[in-house]
Image: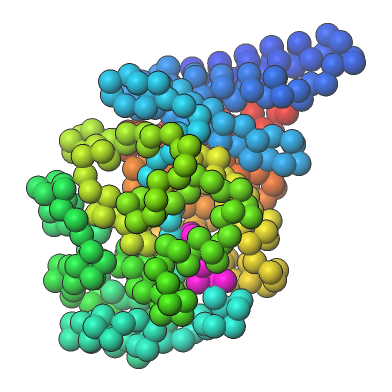
């Protein structure tokens, strides 16, 4: 019922905009004002039916349509504080795409090969730890960390870990501690390449690999390899590891209301070292995605092609996963992107040459990411 109401409202709005634009043949139907009206109305309509989402944040980056639009609906916290369009938030597993791109930059620079095995790429301490738990690091490849076919048991996706976080939300985790937890909380899942199993621990190991080649903290290396400054990404940083950006607004609160979690009340180290960790505005996230898929980060087109390499384990897998991105189809339009724990997502749609970043501030309402993408894509197709 709610979906049909929303669709009807959107259709009515399209008719109003179309009618208004036709009244004067000298009026451009695709004015910025009309676009803003359409997108904001979509956002407001969905929020009006889902106010327990706390806040909704969107950025659309569509250069060929001359659109670079940010919008919000709702509030930045459950106390009804004002929500601003440029307010950053934790993007959690969206971080994996940034880590993947940094690894591919090292490949492009000739410093790394995706088919290298990891025994000499990670620290000796970590290698010894994995070996002692039954992992054959001389068989696990870099590409298998990127596409989650390494066979390494995760820590972050377990009920035990989430209970630890809820029981002691202010505990400051280290990367080493979390890798140790991956060994403690489960046995090897299988041989490398045997099965797909999404695991943050794979990306923690990838940040170790980045550090082994650059000699710098992974967060500094990722910033430099992607070149945030060149792309104009002024509100993107690893929370608590890098300095808070000058002039950036306070982080929006993000909630998992059913579990009593507030991003302000948990130490960000629980999701920080490559599996997650970045904070960003919706605009920075969409600009990163748009820049990536328009080859403004890599020097060579062939490097970008690598990111589309799909996981192909021996055992069948549900869905598809590439190197830090997932393919998906929305409204019949193919897209590529990633989602994050707190209710974030970004996707690039090649047919539209458009990136859409969405933050839903209550994880329990993260399904609205799909509703927003569907409605916004429909709006874009009508412009």
Q: Is residue 316 above or below residue 234?
A: below
Q: Quadrant of the N terminus?
A: top left
Q: Quadrant of the C terminus?
A: top right
Q: Residue at x 29, y 55 (%)?
A: 271
Q: Main secondary structure of the magenta part?
A: helix
Of 240 and 33, nearer the camera is 240
Residue 13: quadrant of the picture: top right
Please state if 55 lies on the left or on the right of 382 as rendered: left
Asked whether the viewer can see residue 143, the reply is no
Of 321 and 182, nearer the camera is 182
Please state if 275 lies on the left or on the right of 247 as rendered: left
Residue found farthest to the front = 246
Give x and y (percent) for residue 133.
Answer: 18, 82
Q: Is residue 272 magenta?
A: no
Please state if 265 lies on the left or on the right of 13 as rendered: left
Give x and y (percent) for residue 22.
Answer: 82, 13
Asked whether the viewer can see residue 32, the reply is yes
Give x and y (percent) for residue 303.
Answer: 63, 71
Q: Is residue 102 magenta?
A: yes
Find the magenta span and give its range: 97-105
Residue 367: quadrant of the picture: top left
Q: Residue at x 23, y 33 (%)?
A: 257
Q: Residue at x 52, y 82 (%)?
A: 112
Give x and y (percent) for residue 45.
Answer: 49, 19
Of 20 and 27, nearer the camera is 27
Residue found farthest to the right = 26
Q: Is residue 310 above or below residue 380?
A: below
Q: Residue at x 23, y 77 (%)?
A: 188
């Amino acid at each position: 019922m709610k979906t049909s109401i929303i669709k009807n409202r959107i259709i009515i709005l399209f008719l109003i905009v179309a009618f208004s634009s036709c009244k004067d043949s000298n009026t451009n139907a695709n004015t910025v004002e009309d676009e803003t009206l359409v997108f904001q109305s979509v956002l407001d309509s969905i929020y009006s039916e889902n106010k327990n989402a706390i806040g909704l944040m969107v950025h659309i980056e569509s250069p060929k349509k001359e659109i670079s639009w940010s919008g919000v609906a709702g509030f930045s916290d459950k106390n009804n504080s004002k929500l601003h369009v440029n307010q950053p938030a934790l993007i959690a597993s969206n971080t994996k795409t940034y880590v993947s791109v940094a690894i591919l930059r090292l490949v492009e620079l000739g410093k790394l090969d995706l088919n290298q095995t990891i025994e000499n790429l990670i620290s000796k301490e970590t290698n010894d730890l994995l070996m002692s738990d039954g992992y054959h690091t001389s068989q696990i490849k870099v590409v298998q960390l990127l596409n989650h076919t390494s066979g390494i048991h995760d820590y972050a996706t377990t009920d035990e870990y989430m209970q630890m976080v809820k029981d002691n939300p202010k505990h400051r985790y280290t990367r080493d501690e979390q890798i140790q937890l991956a060994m403690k909380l489960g046995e090897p899942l299988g041989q490398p390449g045997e099965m797909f199993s999404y695991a943050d621990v794979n990306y923690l190991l990838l940040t170790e690999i980045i550090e082994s080649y650059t000699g710098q903290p992974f967060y500094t290396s990722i910033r430099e390899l992607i070149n945030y400054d060149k792309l104009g990404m002024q509100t993107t940083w690893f929370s608590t590891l890098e300095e808070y950006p000058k002039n950036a607004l306070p982080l929006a609160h993000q909630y998992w209301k059913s579990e009593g979690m507030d991003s302000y009340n948990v130490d960000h180290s629980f999701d920080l070292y490559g599996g997650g960790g970045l904070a960003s505005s919706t605009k920075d996230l969409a600009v990163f995605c748009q820049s990536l898929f328009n080859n403004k980060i890599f020097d060579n087109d062939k490097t970008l092609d690598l990111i589309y390499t799909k996981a192909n384990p021996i055992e069948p897998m549900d869905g598809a996963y590439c190197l830090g991105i997932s393919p998906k189809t929305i409204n019949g339009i193919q897209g590529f992107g990633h989602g994050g724990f707190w209710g974030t997502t970004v996707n690039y749609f090649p047919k539209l040459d458009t990136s859409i970043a969405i933050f839903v501030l209550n994880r329990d309402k993260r399904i609205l990411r799909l509703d927003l993408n569907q409605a916004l894509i429909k709006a874009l197709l009508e412009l």
